[in-house]
Amino acid sequence: MITSAQNKKIQEVRRLVAKRKEREAAGLYIAEGIRLVEEALAHAEDCAYLLWCSPLSDRAEALVKSFANAGVSVEEITPQLMDSITGTDSPQGVLAVMQMSPLPLPGKADFVVIADGIQDPGNLGTLFRTAAAAGADALLLMPGCADEFSPKVIRSGMGTHFRLPFARMDWDTCEKWLRSLPDMRILAADSDGGISCWETDLRRPSALIIGSEANGPCGRALALSDARILIPMPGKIESLNAGIAAGILIFEVVRQRSKTSGDR
């Protein structure tokens, strides 16, 4: 059992939780809590090690055994140490240190979500979860976005980092990749103008750019886009929270694509 706060693994976890540059330098991040660690189990080969503390629920105990059976280094630590290194108020007793190994971008795609300067970790995590729930083929992260491997983004994403292909890239690379996809139309969500999302044909292959609540789409995003779309807002409100706006637009894509031709 690890009992010392000076233990190398404990020190490493503290650094990974606290600083982006430490995560990037090590190529590691933290998945903490039963739900996230269960999602990580399918990628046990990417787990550097797992830490746990008692008491464990039956579900968490089975999870620890599964990681051990998969050949992952599993170590018990004291509850006090677990409390000190996790970013949650009520730790669930399991924490996995994972390698940054996102799913690769697909060779074919007809629905892509692009995060443009989403700086709030909660909103970015919500965007991960919403895109995955809608069956998006990929999520692209443009300059200015929050760290996709920060503990808050990982928690908000609820395990979708293991399910949804995503990549961080610059705008030039983004444009090159999108233009390589047949018939892909690039749409920028912009509350300042554009076509209503209800009136936009989203059955076509589409890449949807979601900007920040404060700034909307950046100039590069607008220059890249083939059209702008907006969410009609009869109330006297300038903009919606980025996560809410993304949910409305992304599931408008789902709604349109789920309708049969006879319903149109």
Image (cartoon, rainbow, N blue to C red):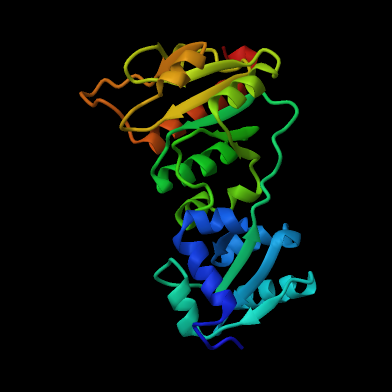
The location of residue 181, given as percent across then percent down, is 69, 19
Q: Quadrant of residue 54?
A: bottom right
At x 40%, y 23%, the residue is: 218
At x 69%, y 26%, the residue is: 109
Quarter of the image with the C terminus in it:
top right
Q: Is residue 23 visible?
A: yes
In this rendering, the answer to whether 140 lies above or below 63 is above
At x 43%, y 34%, the residue is: 117
Q: Is residue 255 visible?
A: no
The location of residue 8, given as percent across then percent down, is 58, 77
Q: Quadrant of residue 2?
A: bottom right
Quarter of the image with the N terminus in it:
bottom right
Residue extending farthest to the left is 236
At x 43%, y 66%, the residue is: 87
**Along the line of sight, the residue nearer the viewer: 8 or 203:** 8
What is the number of callouts on the image?
Answer: 0
Residue 187 horizontal side relative to residue 26, left or right:
left
The location of residue 28, given as percent across then percent down, is 61, 59
The location of residue 165, given as percent across then percent down, is 65, 40
In this rendering, the answer to whether 247 lies above or below 146 is above
